[in-house]
Image (cartoon, rainbow, N blue to C red):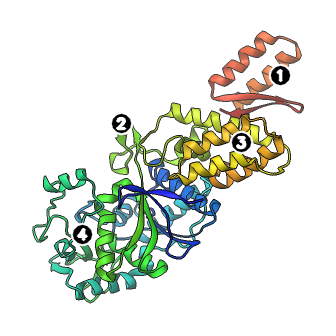
Amino acid sequence: MGLRLYNSLTRSKDELIPAAPPAVSLYTCGPTVYNYQHVGNYRTYIFEDLLVRTLKLLGYAPKRVLNITDVGHLTSQGDEGEDKMEVGAAREGKTAWDVAKFYTDAFLADWKKLGLLDADEMPRATGYIKEQIAMVAELDKKGFVYKTSDGLYFDTSKFPRYGEMMTKEHLEGLKSGARVEANPEKRHNTDFALWKFSPAGAKRQMEWDSPWGKGFPGWHIECSAMARKILGDSIDIHCGGIDHVPVHHTNEIAQSEGATGKPFSRFWLHGEFLLMNNAKMAKSAGGFVKLADLEEKGFSPLDYKYMCYTAHYRKQLDFTWESLESAKTARRRLRDAAQALPAATKADAAASARLREALADDLNAPGALAAVWDALKSSCEPGAKRAFLDEAESALALGLFAAETEAAVPAEVAALVASRAEAKAKKDFAESDRIRKRIEDMGWLVKDGKDGSKAVKK
């Protein structure tokens, strides 16, 4: 079965034809590890994980690279401001290296909670400084680079196809001067830094010697250099968030193809924003929601993953606690139904075909969920349903068959569960129902079983 994906470069849904099938080379932009990642960031990683799982389901052999940005990402999209790692170090009174390690570890812990597949390679920008310097030197030799007082810049006028992936809205923004930056030495408002010089008279925590002086790489060059080193001059798929299109990914194309003279990536996939209060969730806005915040309110990270699947990855999704509650309820129902099924036999062919067709159509996760629910309601025998759900779980990874750690029951709730048990024993059902309602109002459910009653987080 062919896989059709929306390619931001062609602005159309195209069939994936890898350079060396069944292998698929895949580069996905990873986190800047100066702070916790928020759930909007994780929506992108969830869609990319679904891509990897779908490739595997359809018989491809993906090799995924996920970078860790631990230097060079400035607080401005236009090469102004401070390095985010230095900002994080100043905020927490730690070294930039310690900040990078702490938030990388936090990211990997969240990654595991979401049930995401490990990347084949997870390079850190600081581990590929030599390759980045070499690529800048290559671009310099080919005439793409000019020097200013604060660094080396890529001259976008020398790359005629610059901005080909931008939409009409992006281009209109450029015409109106939306990306004009404070640096008067830049020749064009779209030019971007390849290498930044360390400020005179100051020592940065992260800086390296280069042919042009002590400094550090620009944000964009790391992805081009690492993708080239690990995956080759040309790759099959490059992914990221939709906000990467007008700056980061546009600049990657220019510098990569300027250096090699070859197409950088055949496909470009971009996930849309997660909205909260009708605005994009962003750390710069403050008050962003972390996975830990979900867990504190009694949600599993997999409930959030289910919520993400209710919208296509190219559609904006509004985050509300009510929608997350609905996703939690739906996932629990699905999980309970799955675990009640007997041993697997042979997957229902019709259900399997429908699941694959949905995923092969640009990762249609809502369609895949619909296929799962319809299969459960179907008249096919239980063992076939179980076998199909095994297949669906390999793609969706919702923890349908895994034992989940239950939240610790507060003492007050435990006492109410005991009081309800006493009321039931006395056949005082009105009091039993009253206590059950009180427990539910506190965010817990009572489950009765042969071994007694217990409370579980709603």
Mark 3 to mark 1: distance in Å?
20 Å
Q: Nearer the viewer, mark 3 or mark 4?
A: 4
Q: Residues within 10 Å of mark 2 (few under 14, many from 20)?
A: few
Closer to the camera in the image, 373 or 411: 373
Q: Residues within 10 Å of mark 3 (few under 14, many from 20)?
A: few
Q: Nearer the viewer, mark 2 or mark 3?
A: 2
Compared with 1, 122 (above or below) is: below
Compared with 120, 284 (above or below) is: above
The residue at which mark 4 appears reads as: 161
The residue at which mark 3 appears reads as: 406
CB within 8 Å, label 3 to label 4: no
Locate residue 55, reporting x and y percent. 58, 62
**Residue 304 seen in this snapshot:** no
CB within 8 Å, label 2 to label 1: no
Identify residue type, mark 2: Asn
Q: Dot 3: what SS?
A: loop
- Which label's residue is closer to the chain start, 3 or 1? 3
How many marks are shown on the rendered structure?
A: 4
The residue at which mark 2 appears reads as: 278
Q: Nearer the viewer, mark 4 or mark 1?
A: 4
Locate residue 286, reporting x and y percent. 36, 45
Q: Which numbered marker is on residue 421? A: 1
- Which label's residue is closer to the chain start, 3 or 4? 4
Q: Residue at x 88, y 13 (%)?
A: 426
**Residue 285 seen in this snapshot:** yes
Identify residue type, mark 3: Glu
Q: Residues within 10 Å of mark 1 (few under 14, many from 20)?
A: some
- Which label's residue is closer to the chain start, 2 or 4? 4
Q: Which residue occupies the extreme left position in the image? A: 184
